[in-house]
Image (tube, rainbow, N blue to C red):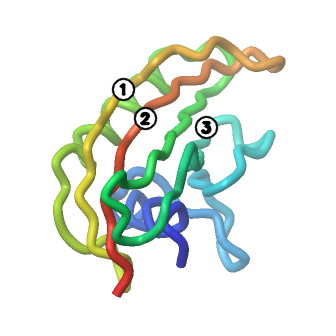
């Protein structure tokens, strides 16, 4: 798994959504934020760096809620931050060893063309592939 997929899988493990896979439809995605479902989270790369990089990887986590529901994506972004802030250990399954630092949390990104509100959070992740 790459670092984005590993973070997405870890969020699933923590009960913050269901990772979308070939076997199961979910609301957690990595590398893409598809048009559906309305309530969705996407783990995206700003700079994935490489395992062991002293600079760490920079990722963004987008949360989106149903039409007109500003509370849903905002509170989801805050819940994700509480779960990831200061995490230091192995990500779920056979994920890499990481140290996660929040950079900015729940920045309003407005609404998409369907009226669904978006929030974006930025994290720096220091990781080693084993």
Asked if the residues shown at circle 1 and circle 3 are in contact, with their CB atoms under 8 angstroms apart, the answer is no
| Front residue of 101 and 82 | 101
Q: Residues within 10 Å of mark 2 (few under 14, many from 20)?
A: many
Where does residue 22 sit, x and y in percent of width and height? 72, 76
What separation in Å lies between label 2 and label 1 (alpha carbons)? Answer: 6 Å
Q: Relative to residue 22, is residue 20 depicted above or below?
A: above
The residue positioned 19% from the left and 69% from the top of the image is: 89
SS for dot 1: strand
Where in the figure is residue 117, as x and y percent of width and height? 62, 18
Mark earlier in primary sequence (2, 3): 3
Q: Is residue 47 above or below residue 51?
A: above
Which residue in the structure is indicated by mark 2?
122
Where does the C terminus fall, quadrant-wise? bottom left
- Label 2 close to label 1 by CB (< 8 Å): yes
Residue 105 got which mark? Answer: 1
Towards the viewer: 118 or 71: 118
For mark 3, give the secondary structure.
Answer: loop
* Residue at left offset 48%, top offset 25%: 72
Mark 2 or 1, nearer chain start = 1
Q: Which residue is mark 3?
A: 39
Q: Is residue 31 left or right of residue 28?
A: right
Q: Nearer the viewer, mark 1 or mark 3?
A: 1
Q: Position of residue 49 (x, y in %)?
A: 49, 59
């Amino acid at each position: 798994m790459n670092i984005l997929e590993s973070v997405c899988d870890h969020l699933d493990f923590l009960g913050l959504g269901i990772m979308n896979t070939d076997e199961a439809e979910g609301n957690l995605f990595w590398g893409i934020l598809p048009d559906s479902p309305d309530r969705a989270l996407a783990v995206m790369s700003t700079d994935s760096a490489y395992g062991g990089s002293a600079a760490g990887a920079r990722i963004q986590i987008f949360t989106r809620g149903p039409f007109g529901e500003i509370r849903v994506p905002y509170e989801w972004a805050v819940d994700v931050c509480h779960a990831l802030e200061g995490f230091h250990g192995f990500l779920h399954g056979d994920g890499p060893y990481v140290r996660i630092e929040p950079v900015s949390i729940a920045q309003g990104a407005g609404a998409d063309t369907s009226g669904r509100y978006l929030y974006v959070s930025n994290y720096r992740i220091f990781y080693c592939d084993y």
